[in-house]
Every structure is written in C-alpha cells, then in structure tokens.
Image: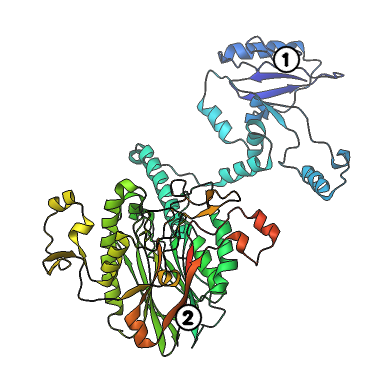
Amino acid sequence: MNTTHDDNAERITLRSHEGARHSEPLITDDESEFGHTNDQLQQPQQRHDDSESNNNNNDDHGSNDNDEEQQQPLLRRTYSQESGISTDSAPPPYEFYPPAKTFLGRAFNWIRAIPRIPRRHQAIALPLHQRFHSHHHSDSLSSTSIDSFASSAYPATCCSYYYHVCLGRLPRATLPVWLARCRWVLICISIFAIILFAFLLFCSIFFAPASLSPATLPDLQTNSSGRFLTLNIFMRPPGVTNNWSDYKEERLDYIVRYILPQYDVVAFQEAFAFGTRRKDRLIQRGRNMGYNHHVESPRHFPWDLGVDGGLLIMSRFPIRTFNTMEYPRGIHSDWLAYKGALHALIEFNPTQSIHLYTTHAQASYSQLSHQVDMQVRMSQFAQFHQFIKETSQRDNNIPMLLLGDFNVDAAVHDGSITEPSRSSSVEYQLMMDVLDGKGIERKKLYSVDNYNKEKEDTSNQKRQNGGKRLLYQDMYRLTLSDKVYAHYGYHPVTFGDIILNKNGEIEPAETILTDSEQVMTVQSIDRILWEQDRGKASSMFIRDAQVEKFLVQSNDMMSEYDKLQSPFTQISDHYGLSCVVQLS
C-alpha cells in the first residue's frame, strides 16, 4: 500500500497495488521519508512548500501509475494517524492464556480478557516535529476522538482511558483577563486553603474530646470502703520518648487489663491527650469496666502553643461536682504543658462523700536549676491551696484526699542510697506548710542574693507574723497528713529505684522507661495526703496506704511466656500509691 501526503489540503490518498504482499509508503520529493532500517523508524518530516509544487509532484506520480492503481475515498487525517504507527499487536484471546490453577490466576486471566479501551490495536507513539502550526491543524487536533488521543499519547490502560473520557466531558471555564494575571496568587491561596483545611480537620480528629458510648454498668455505691490509686502513667504526647516509642500502646493495654480492675477510683498523671487518642481509649475502655465518671485536664490545640496538663480522674462512684485549674506556665520543658489540678466530689452513697484532688507540679531536670524549680513549685502549691479553699470551703464536714505527683523529693540523701530516709527534706517541709496555709519564711525559699534583689511583695500572701516575713500564708488552714510516710515510717522510693543483683551489686531497678540521667536517684515524689480534722469529723479514715510497683514479673495474672514477651519491666517510670478509704 502506497500513501502520499498532501499537507496543504490535509488529506490522505490511499493507493493499493495488486498482488503486493507488503505495503510501503510512496515518498515524494518534497516530503521526508519513512526510512525503514533494521534498528529504527525515522519520523516523517513534513515540509510546507508552495501548493503548486506539491500538486505538480502528485500529478506526476499519478500519471505514471494510472493503469495500476485505483483511487480510494479521501480520508480525514486524525491526530493518531500523524503521531503513531499501529503495530496490530492486539492481546491474545482468552483461550491462548496459560491455564490458571488458582482462583486468583483465573481472575487475573479474566481481567486481562476485558478490553481496556475500544481500540484493540495498541500504537507506538512518535514525537512530531512541525515547523508550522496552523489554526486549521489545531482544530483538527481538538476534534480528534478520545480513543485516538489515548492510544497515541498515553499508555493503553483502563485508568488513562476513563480519565480522558471524564476530562473531555468536564466543563471548561475561562478566567477573565484581570483574574488570569493573578493566577499564581490564586494558586497559592488555594494551596494555603487546602493545607489550612487539612490542619483543622486533623485538629478536630486528634485534639477534640471523642464521643463516649453510654455506660453499660451501673454506678457503684458502698457503705464500707473504696480503693484509690494514684499513678504517673508516663504517657507523653507523640514524638516525646526516651526510647523508640516508650511502648505506650502496650502499657495502655496493660493498665486496662491488670490495673483498672483492682480499684474503684484512679488518679492518673501524664495521661496527655495532645495529638493522640490514647486518653480517649483509656476513658472508653474504663467506661466499659464501670468507670462511668471521669474528670480531665482542659484540652489544648496547637495554636495554644502547649499541651494539656495530662491529669485524669476515673471513678466507679458518681462524681457530683468537679472543677479544674491551670497553673501559670512553668519553666524548662514544663513550659509546654498547662499543668494544674483537678477536683472531684465523689459520692460513696447518698449520705457520704469525699473531696478528691490531684495535681502534677513543676519537675526538676537538673540540680543546677533546683532552686528556681523549687520557687515555681511553691508558687503552684500556694495556688493549689487557694483552689482547695474555693472548692471545699462550703462543705467543712466532707473529708479531703490529695493525690498526685508533687515532684518534691521528701527523702534526705545524706547516707547510703540503700538506706530508707526517715527524715524529711527541707523542701518537703516547705511544701506541707504551703499546702496547710501556714506560709513559709522568705529566707528559706530564696538564697541571700536573690533575697536582696527581690522587691517587697505587698500581696495578701505575705504578712507579718511574730517579726517573721512569711510567704503564701492564708487564713484558711488545713491539717494534712502523709499517709504513706505514716504507714512505712520512712519515705519510700517512688522514682529512680535500685535493686541488688545476685552478686550484691547495686543496679537500676528500671532502665527502659526511666531517663538515663535520673536512674538510681531514689526519689520519693508521689504523695497521698489526708486532711485529718475533716476525717475525724466524718468518721472516715485511710488504711493500707502503700507503694504499688506494678512489676511485670510480679503479676500473677500473666503467664511466664507473656512475662518474657513483655517489652517493659514495670508499667511506668514511677511507682503507684494506693490506699483504702474506710467509711466507718
């Protein structure tokens, strides 16, 4: 088959030879050749000469072959005909596919048998090099079918075919000239709007409280006692870890399975909700176990430049009223957390209730800044005292229990670290005085240099008492008692504990979760404080106040295999404290 091109008329004349087994294009003098070699196909070069010379050449060839050829109808040149060469490479029919032995193999053969585009012949796309681009040629390109466009310019896939089908049916809008000049500004605004929408959607999913399912178990009531627990569970926000992940998911599952069933009321610290749903899952799973009531720290969004306080109270008993508070920003990394305190009025029965408080104070990360850290903590304890006053002053006969991580080391480290501390540190005594409302001497809180530089404080917290200048003094007084210290006779270690190995050598009790700089510091920083006067008036009292280490190896509910597979040795870097509130 011989083909001659008339570029000016944009038409194709098809000529056939009798008895010819192969078709070859007839090349004119004014056109480039389809040069067939063994290795490549050379693309035709279209030359736009004068119409008269092209017509004369075509007439010469036509007169020479007038007896041997038969002119066929003229065909409109399409985009696929000028940009691709059909290879007649249709996929083999279904019966020629290798027989499938599996269901997936038969499904794959069945999918391959489905025509992906209407054309059965795939095409080899060839680039075009045109010297001129006429308006008539652009119209011919725009009028081409989707089939020829997809087969010549894009791979013959189902996705590309339907993409161009849908693209061709979409309405086309033209921007005004004044708006088209600002198209880059519009693109930037659109990208910013998409990013802002995605950010707000992310915040609504991971920062707002999740909806909870209805309670499935009735509220608990008792006339005898209730079991209480305080524990720093060390569930910091995502990305803040001491190792790969701090095993937060595994430890959360451990808490739900082995710790929550043992207690009636729990007070957790470092149960952060920022950027994660762990806290919501903990609340929901506790709700399924009968913890129908909870109080948590106010949640914060990224634009607050801080995370929530991480406090959580969960109770099987009804919570009649609750309150929350936040301290001013702390220092060091604690500046990023809105630490504070929680209050819950828990009802044991219609005639007996208890005020429960929990807090998490400023932490110390270095001995160099311990003095400044202590000043921040005392200021927080003074605010905690005012919070207690405002929420419990109306009910003077209801007992009061304070739980939490106070971050004040009560132990005195003047001997061997293996010996328990029976004496109380100076900072511990200052903390108790501030919480009681007695106030503290200024010189005990500030060094001499800082004392000379401090300006006179004229607030109500500083009064003259026997010639002594006191800070954080208040007329509302409490009589708090450390029940864990009363139970043991010394301040037990709750953070950075040690053990003795088989050779009698001292080793850290825990190294997976505890920071490497704080191992073997043997600190006593978690507290259970009981208001004695109110307890006597209500005939309630505290018993069995003790340390709960929550060691994996000591868990009798786990098999030996599960203990060996556990990636952590204890539930947190802190030990927990538990007690029983006896009603009568």
Name the residue rendered at 64%, 11% in the picture: 56
Which labelled disc corresponds to residue 26? Answer: 1
Left or right: 203 in relation to 499: left
Vertical arrangement, residue 433 with respect to residue 369, above or below: below
x, y percent for residue 278: 51, 60
Left or right: 35 in relation to 381: right
Quadrant housing the N terminus: top right
Question: Which residue does the numbered mark 2 point to in the structure image?
Answer: 317
What amino acid type is highlighted by mark number 2?
Answer: Phe
SS at circle 1: loop
SS at circle 2: loop
What amino acid type is highlighted by mark number 1?
Answer: Leu
Q: Earlier in the sequence, mark 1 or mark 2?
A: 1
Quadrant housing the C terminus: bottom left
Q: Nearer the viewer, mark 1 or mark 2?
A: 2
Which labelled disc corresponds to residue 69? Answer: none
x, y percent for residue 537: 34, 87
x, y percent for residue 236: 46, 55
State the CA–CA distance, disc 1 to disc 2.
Answer: 97 Å
Classify 10 Å Cα crowding around label 1: few (below 14), some (14-19), many (20 and above): some
Q: Is residue 255 visible?
A: yes
